[in-house]
């Protein structure tokens, strides 16, 4: 919850008193037409009473003139005794999903407020600007209102600042109170549930197939560590304790987690069009769905882009793993990163290639935009020997927004899409073409059922041609 802040009283001194007088004088600018009319009528009545010598008219003039002045003074003091706060529920939502914003107004004044008009500042993509009219708030009372926001586009959107317009009961004056605090709504990519298929090379970390390095270790193979507060005393390793002179405990089962890298091609030249149904948004949503799915299945996941930047992990390697709580935090951080990812100015995949070739392997899932022949060869080299690699490749002909104009740009791709897929399969990739509206769950299931094609230097059965026929049936 973000608070607009309670009433702030300035420090004592001539400077503070001068600022208060200046603020009070500026408050007279909030007089309404009624208030100005009363003030003018009062001054006119007082002048006429002096000319005509009518004391009763002077009393009427003073009443008319004093009433708006008193309203300004009271409202000026009340304005700084009203606090506002905002709460998002939730603060992170998928695209096309609604979030609710709760606003709360508290009065810390000893006097009741007049009519309140509340307005919150929101970006136009989240919907119309919300406005509310609140009845008078009793001393120490509060009012709560709420509104909904929704965005079809991912991103981070500021909400606020909150503005409150106060009026006195007589309608003589209107003053605006602005709060400096604001909140941020994070709209993350849509995450599509994926079926639990088994991809090659992931048995050691998938579901119940994980193995433990020290579970079968003998007594002489135990690697002890220092005792920590809360450790079970039954795990104390007395031989190591006697050797090191301090309490040492046994390290029990340590699971070897399967690693995965999700590669997202963000090159601006690889995609056409914009908006929630553009091919780039499909790729971002696919990367988010894959990362969340593999984290839930027990993988240690790294998110990598064509620029070479990755979401770093606690161990400094860019991977996440550990408990379910760690996986949830990792999924949240990756979704936050994908919420603001944009097109890069890179023209090639060299940066990502260097990182993948120097890594430790593991499952590789890539989402590629349009590839020319040079980048296809480079992408094929990203896969290390014995590593399962799955590529979802944009079909530029199917995603073309302006086919006639694209016909004159055929040299941009350099060769047809089928040849591009064949080159990736010959390099050992499981390559699937992506067409508009293609459900990622179906493509994911197809990748798991067909199996990878062996690349150069890989041993094993299967042929690239056999896989090509399966994928070709889906294109």
Image: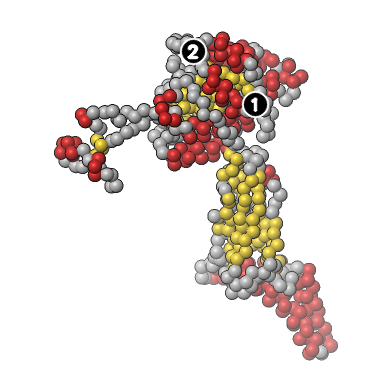
Asked if residue 45 is positioned above or below residue 457 in the image, the reply reads below
Looking at the image, which residue is at 52% across and 34% down? 292
Residue underneath mark 1? 438
Can residue 21 be seen in the rendering of this structure? Answer: no
Left of 464 or right of it: where is 362?
left
Instruction: Tell me if residue 103 comes above or below residue 358 in the rendering.
Output: below
- Image quadrant containing the C terminus: top right
Q: Quadrant of residue 50?
A: bottom right
Mark 1 burial class by Cα count in 10 Å: few <14, some 14-19, many 20+: few
Q: Is residue 315 visible?
A: yes
Position of residue 382 measured from the top left corner of the image (x, y, whole percent): 49, 18
Residue located at (67% from left, 28% from top): 437
Residue hosting label 2: 454
Local SS, label 1? loop
- Left or right position of 419 against 323: right
Relative to 257, is 56 above or below? below
Whichever of labels 2 and 1 marks the residue nearer the N terminus, that label is 1
């Amino acid at each position: 919850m973000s608070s607009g802040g309670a009433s702030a009283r300035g420090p004592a001194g001539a400077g503070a008193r001068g600022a208060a007088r200046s603020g009070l004088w500026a408050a007279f600018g909030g007089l309404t037409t009624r208030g100005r009319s009363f003030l003018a009528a009062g001054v006119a009545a007082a002048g006429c009473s002096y000319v005509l010598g009518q004391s009763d008219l002077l009393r009427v003039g003073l009443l008319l003139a004093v009433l708006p002045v008193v309203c300004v003074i009271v409202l000026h003091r009340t304005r700084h005794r009203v606090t506002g706060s905002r709460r998002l529920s939730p603060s992170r939502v998928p695209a096309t999903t609604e979030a609710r914003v709760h606003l709360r107004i508290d009065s810390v004044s000893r006097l009741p407020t007049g009519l309140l008009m509340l307005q919150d500042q929101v970006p136009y993509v989240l919907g119309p600007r919300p406005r509310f009219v609140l009845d008078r708030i009793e001393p120490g009372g509060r009012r709560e209102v709420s509104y909904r926001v929704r965005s079809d586009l991912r991103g981070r959107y500021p909400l606020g600042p909150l503005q409150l317009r106060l009026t006195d009961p007589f309608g003589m004056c209107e003053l605006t109170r602005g709060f400096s605090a604001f909140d941020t709504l994070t709209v993350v990519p849509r995450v599509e549930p994926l079926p639990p298929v088994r991809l090659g090379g992931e048995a050691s970390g998938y579901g119940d197939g994980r193995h433990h390095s020290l579970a079968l270790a003998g007594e002489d193979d135990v690697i002890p560590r220092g005792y920590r507060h809360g450790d079970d005393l039954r795990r104390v390793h007395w031989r190591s304790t006697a050797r090191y002179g301090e309490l040492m405990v046994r390290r029990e089962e340590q699971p070897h987690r399967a690693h995965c890298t999700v590669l997202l091609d963000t090159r601006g030249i690889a995609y056409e069009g914009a908006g929630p149904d553009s091919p780039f948004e499909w790729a971002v949503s696919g990367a988010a769905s894959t990362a969340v799915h593999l984290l839930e299945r027990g993988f240690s996941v790294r998110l990598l882009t064509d620029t070479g930047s990755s979401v770093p992990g606690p161990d400094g390697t860019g991977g996440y793993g550990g408990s379910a709580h760690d996986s949830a935090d990792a999924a949240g951080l990756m979704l936050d990163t994908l919420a603001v990812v944009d097109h890069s100015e890179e023209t090639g995949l060299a940066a990502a290639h260097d990182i993948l070739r120097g890594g430790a392997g593991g499952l590789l899932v890539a989402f590629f935009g349009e590839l020319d022949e040079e980048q296809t060869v480079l992408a094929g080299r990203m896969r290390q020997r014995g590593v399962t690699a799955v590529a979802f490749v944009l079909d530029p002909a199917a995603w073309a927004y302006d086919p006639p104009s694209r016909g004159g740009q055929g040299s941009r791709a350099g060769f047809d899409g089928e040849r591009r897929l064949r080159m990736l399969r010959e390099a050992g990739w499981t390559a699937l073409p992506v067409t508009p509206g293609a459900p990622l769950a179906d493509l994911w299931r197809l990748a798991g059922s067909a199996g990878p094609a062996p690349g150069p230097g890989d041993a094993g059965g299967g042929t690239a041609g056999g896989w090509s026929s399966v994928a070709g049936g889906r294109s």
